[in-house]
Amino acid sequence: MKKFLLTIATLLYAVLCFAQEPIISWNYELKYEANNIVNVIFTGNIAPEFHTYTLDDEISPTEIFDVVLEGAEESEAIYGSTDTKLIDGHQAYEGLIKLTQPLRLTSDKGSYSGTIFTVSCKHGQCRSEYYDFNIALSAAKEAAAAATVSQAPDDNAGGNKNGSSIWSLILEAILWGFAMLLTPCVFPMVPMTVSFFMKGSGTPAQGRFKASMYGLFIVLLYTVPISIIILLTRVIGGDAVTADIFNWLATHWLPNIIFFIVFMVFAASFFGAFEITLPSKWTNAADKNSDKGGLGGIFFLALTLVLVSFSCTGPIVGTVLIKSTQGEFWAPMVTMLAFSIAFALPFTLLAFFPSLIKKFKQSSGSWLSSVKVVLGFIEVALGLKFLSTADQTYHWGILDREVYLAIWIVVFSLLGLYLLGKIRFKGEEKVEYIGVTRLTLAIAVFSFVVYLIPGMWGAPLKALSGYLPPITTQDFVLSSGSSNSAATYQVSESSSENRFGLELPLGLSGYFTLDEGLKAAKEADKPVFVDVTGHGCVNCREMEARVWSDPEVLRILREDYIIVALYNDDKQKLDEKDYVTDAQSGKVYKDLGRANSYLARTLWGVNAQPNYVLLSPDGEQLVPVRGYDLSIEGFIAFLQSGLEAYRK
């Protein structure tokens, strides 16, 4: 066991030592013109405080070398944008670097590959980076119609000269793995894990073995199926498997209702209604060898964790699948392995903990019983998130914000009374007095209830924005005096609200299809702010409550942009004229969510939510895509950079 933990620790240490975030993150655009001309436009987002030198710098020029062209030839020499600054006697880029290579297509299909070399400096310290790219070119009719295609570069991680790309992906995956523990679709599994392993029996060695197998099962359940899918995608073709599978699992009513019921059943078990046991056939098959003790139950718990966590981890997995369909093979598998190890590690430690606390036999009885009941209340509250996801996605209207809050207020009030000894469950002893710990917990719980109560009248409750239904579902908001259709949440007559019944947060007006948004942008002569979002997206609600609500952000969005919200999980059926057809497979997307998801994947190479894209009225991407980031200053800078790019 010590060797197992040492191996994991060594791997994580190696990743932390060698992984470096790239100074410049690259995107590219293909802008087609007449006479088979295509402009390959590279846009690099330079890290703060760094600067990068121009193509004609005498000492450290930016270069593109090892260029291979198939089915195309250079029409003009590569050139850089002119928005440079004089730094230490050299012309250099800060913030963004933009390079354009005009090409002339000589056949229907072609490719453009090579390596971008940059030297970036900060306070006299410089670092060189190499970024490989391999871009497919096409002279198809739709390309010749002056369409613009925006993608992240098809980097070959194995080909990067310093390996920073793959290591940065691994580091990011590890951080995401740890962060997932705090999400509302994963956190409810914490009490389940603790409760399950508290009931375990056997020697300390058996407890450690079971905990280790729990962690191993989690890693395998994430890594092996994804590897098989990537392999099938590689063998059969990218069209064979798509991220629609994961979108279905995260947003469809059936799995979400099942997850909700599972959590309610577990909560009832924690309250003492019954004991959850596996069918005898499963138990007998899993326990043939007593030394292996209950591996069937441990595997089932790990499988439950992986399935219910997909509401939050699905976008991460979907992004990995997109990379596999863009020509990568090993990098997605390694990335998913790193993610799953980091994700499994906290749960493995939780599984170890109950086996250790058995040593405290004198206090284990009533104390462990109380812990189970407290966890049961938490399960009820957090399990509502799955029902809410289905409710928002399908517009049932059964769990609006005030209903959700009312249930939480009641649940946590009952929890507070339980901690004070005013409520007892069957088999529990009467609480004659409470200690400091229970009193402290009771104070914290009742303080939380007091915090929740103003939300019944429209208080934003920013700290819980990711867990609650959007405030636009609330029937009464005190500041508006009546309903959310009043001034606080008005939607303009010109928007598509009447057609889809959707609303933007914070009183903003906008559109819910890309075509309508681009048309409105041309009429208003404004750039487009595209919000790639979802009803079940926790981080989307948090961004809206914490970042969009900033007065300056709100002003820029309202005055300077046309807003388009693309819900990737909305199940509403489209009119036939709005159907979206996959250009490669011919598949027709007939509902709003799948059509939007397809557009986001193919136009901007993103599948996670939230993501924010700034476009010109012609659909040209102005700056690199921005994802989940709670920095208000960074978001304002992002919006300003889009305005500057549009005005040039």
Image: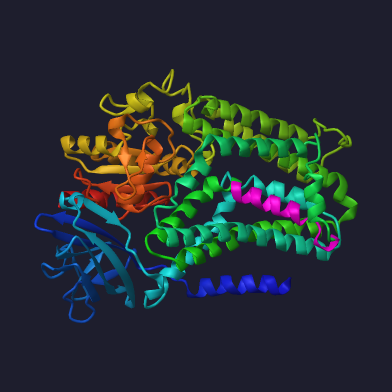
- Colour scheme used in the picture? rainbow
Residue 559 seen anywhere in this rendered image of the structure? yes
Residue 149 locus on image (x, y percent): 25, 53
Magenta highlight: main SS: helix
Point out the image quarter for the N terminus. Answer: bottom right
Residue 61 point in image, percent of width and height: 22, 77
Q: Residue furthest front?
A: 236
In the displayed structure, would residue 298 be above or below residue 132? above
Q: Residue at x 40, y 69 (%)?
A: 165
Location of residue 507 (image quadrant) = top left
Residue 531 location, x and y as percent? 35, 42
| Marker count (numbered) | 0
In-image side of 648 versus 185 (left or right): left
Whether residue 167 sits left or right of residue 496 in the image: it is right
**Residue 301 lies in the magenta stretch:** yes
**Foreground: 354 or 4?**
4
Residue 199 appearing in the image = no
Q: Nearer the viewer, residue 60 or 254?
A: 254
**Residue at point 20%, 43% (across, down):** 617
300 displayed left or right of 393: right
User: Between residues 623 and 544, which one lies in front from this camera angle?
Assistant: 623
Magenta-colored span? 290-307
- Give the farthest residue toward the bottom: 59
- Magenta-colored stretch includes residue 260: no
Q: Residue at x 56, y 35 (%)?
A: 254
Q: Give the farthest residue toward the left.
A: 35
Image: 268 above or below 148: above
Task: Report which quarter residue 87 is drawn in.
Answer: bottom left
Q: Position of residue 160 (x, y in %)?
A: 37, 74
